């Protein structure tokens, strides 16, 4: 949701980087799951992450209860993979919505 990544997505990002290396040269990219959060939500995430997540995924709480999981009260860091998606044409497969769908 904010800083995880699946190994399959890491591999696909590296393969895209190899394919693009000759045309784009060297670049630094954040390879992580695509965050559902916007810049406008960052302050709220740092003070009340549960409310932000519930607004985006209203059904998450019921799924968390079944797993005996707890949402973090705050999220202080969010990784943004936008540059990798844009420059490499990389499309990560796994994100928080995917995890919730697996339940």
Image (cartoon, rainbow, N blue to C red):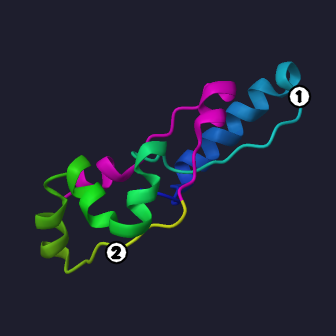
Q: Position of residue 102 (x, y in %)?
A: 24, 54
Residue toward you, 44 or 70: 44
- Give SS at disc 1: loop
- Image-quadrant location for residue 74: bottom left
- Bounds of the magenta span? 78-103
Q: What residue sits 28% from the left and 57% below the top?
A: 53
User: Dot 2 corresponds to which residue?
Assistant: 73
In reply to whether residue 27 is colored magenta, the answer given is no
Q: Is residue 83 left or right of residue 58?
A: right
Residue that protrudes farthest toward the bottom in the picture: 68
Mark 1 packing: few (<14 Cα in 10 Å), some, or many (20+)?
A: few
Q: What residue sits 63% from the left and 48% below the top?
A: 31
Label whose residue precedes the other's in the sequence (2 or 1): 1
User: Dot 1 corresponds to which residue?
Assistant: 25
Q: Is residue 94 above or below residue 53?
A: above
Q: Is residue 32 above or below residue 64?
A: above
Residue toward you, 89 or 3: 3
Residue that protrudes farthest toward the top in the picture: 23
């Amino acid at each position: 949701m904010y800083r995880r990544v699946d190994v399959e997505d890491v591999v696909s990002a590296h393969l895209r980087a190899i394919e693009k290396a000759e045309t784009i040269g060297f670049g630094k990219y954040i390879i992580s799951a695509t965050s559902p959060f916007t810049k406008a939500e960052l302050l709220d995430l740092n003070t009340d992450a549960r409310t932000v997540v519930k607004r985006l995924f209203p059904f998450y709480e019921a799924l968390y209860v079944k797993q005996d999981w707890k949402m973090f009260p705050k999220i202080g860091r969010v990784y943004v993979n936008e540059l990798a998606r844009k420059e490499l044409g990389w499309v990560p497969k796994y994100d928080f919505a995917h995890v919730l769908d697996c339940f």
